[in-house]
Amino acid sequence: MSGLQRFNGTIHAMEQACSLESAPQYPARSRTNNNTLAGMVLFAGFLLAILALVGTVSAYTTPDGISSAGNVYVSSVTIDPAVLFSGDKATATYFVTNGNANKSIAINHVSFGESKDIRLTSDSYDTNANIGPLQTRSFVFTIQTDSGEGSYYPTFSMSFRDADSLYYRTQVKVDNTPLVVTIVDKPDTFTQNKKDSITVQIANPRENDVKNVILDVTGDGVTATPSEIYLGVLASGADMNSTFLITPGQESPVNITVKYDNGDNHHVVSLAMPVSFAPDKKKASPQMSNVKVKLDSGVYDVTGDITNSGLENANGVSVAALSPAVPQDPYKTYVIGALKPDDFGSFEVTFKASGAGSVPLQISYKDTDGNVITSQQDVALTVTDSAQTQNSPSFLPVIAIILLIAVGGGYLYYRRKKNQ
């Protein structure tokens, strides 16, 4: 209650007391003297009360106090977070500046005007305090809202000891727009136990920054590297990309979860990426061609070319003959090395395969993750080179000798016959 209110209340009480003197009087012993004495005491008390109240009013509400309070103002306000989700808590900090160059301002109450939309969850300031000349003092409140999206305007108030109160309205925004998670790069298809790269974009469409952004990757039968990535602060209107590797062991969705803080309030947004297995259209694909078979002393010598018809490198390409072949020196296994897309290399393997009509040749290579991938191609053991002929008994020299003998014998016979 202000000094002026107390003054008016006392005046009213005095008026009621004085009105008793005008009430009808009834004869009584020494009644006149008693009434006169009581009236004098009552009048003296009335004068003292007036003087006391006038002094009180002049001490708490003065023209100088009102003028000085007019130089006190709210210099800035921060709401953290600047924009709330429904149900969020926030810290509202009011900075009050005393613009008087040589006078302190006494305050006795500071409060945040809560309502059904924005409520106060901390205490008000109910103790006396001073703000020195040209100084700024902060007043911090914790607030919370369960209201829907929109703008709300709670009132900050400050009561001065020597003047009226200061009132200041603040805008508090509520917006339930979450972060947006988008997959920007992934394989067209997945291969079981093959490592693939995934890139996601995290965007912040909100009007305020968010902090402690963390990306989590989980899934049944899925190995993620890394499985958790700390991204930090994401500014309003900004986005960032994050890349991780997954190795799926089964066809199961990969859960991409983004956790973040709006002020001190935790929020989550998730995205499920389906994983299904299909042939990899980009992987390396070594193909065998120009195969030739030679046979030398029971040992087959097979040569040919390996061409990488895929879109990725084939590393450590090698060729070997499988059962029923029995590898033989000098080329039990032939290592070609790395083949880039559309590149080729030659090979040569040697083995024995008694009684076999064909032998499987195995092509092995490593993908970019070091996984060994194999394929097979059957090769018919049909001699296509002259080596078999060269190593078989040749009758041409014998025939030539016989022809020479025959020609020579015929010539001698002809000479002899002529001489006779």
Image: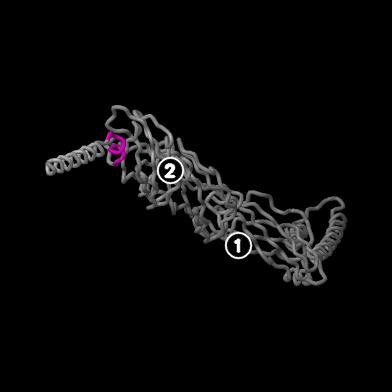
Q: Residue at x 75, y 70 (%)?
A: 99
Q: Residues within 10 Å of mark 1 (few under 14, many from 20)?
A: some
Instruction: Identify the main secondary structure in magenta.
Output: helix
Q: What residue type is labelled 1?
A: Thr
Relative to the observer, which residue lies in front, 339 or 149?
Answer: 339
The figure's colour scheme reads one colour
SS at badge 2: strand
The residue carrying mark 2 is 317
Residue 27 rendering spot, x and y as whole percentages:
81, 53
Q: What stretch is highlighted in magenta?
A: 386-393
- Residue 197 placement, left or right of 89: left
Tell me the quarter of the picture where residue 55 sits. bottom right
- Residue 125 placement, left or right of 175: right
Residue 311 rendering spot, x and y as whole percentages:
39, 51
The residue carrying mark 1 is 170
Residue 198 rendering spot, x and y as whole percentages:
46, 49
User: Answer yes or no: do the residues labelled 1 and 2 have beta carbons within 8 Å?
Assistant: no
Q: Which residue is drawn at 75% across and 58% down?
A: 108
Is 237 placed above or below 189 here? Answer: below
Q: Earlier in the sequence, mark 1 or mark 2?
A: 1
Q: Residue 391 magenta-drawn?
A: yes
Residue 232 rendering spot, x and y as whole percentages:
59, 52
Distance (Cα) linking label 1 and label 2: 71 Å
Q: What residue type is labelled 2?
A: Val
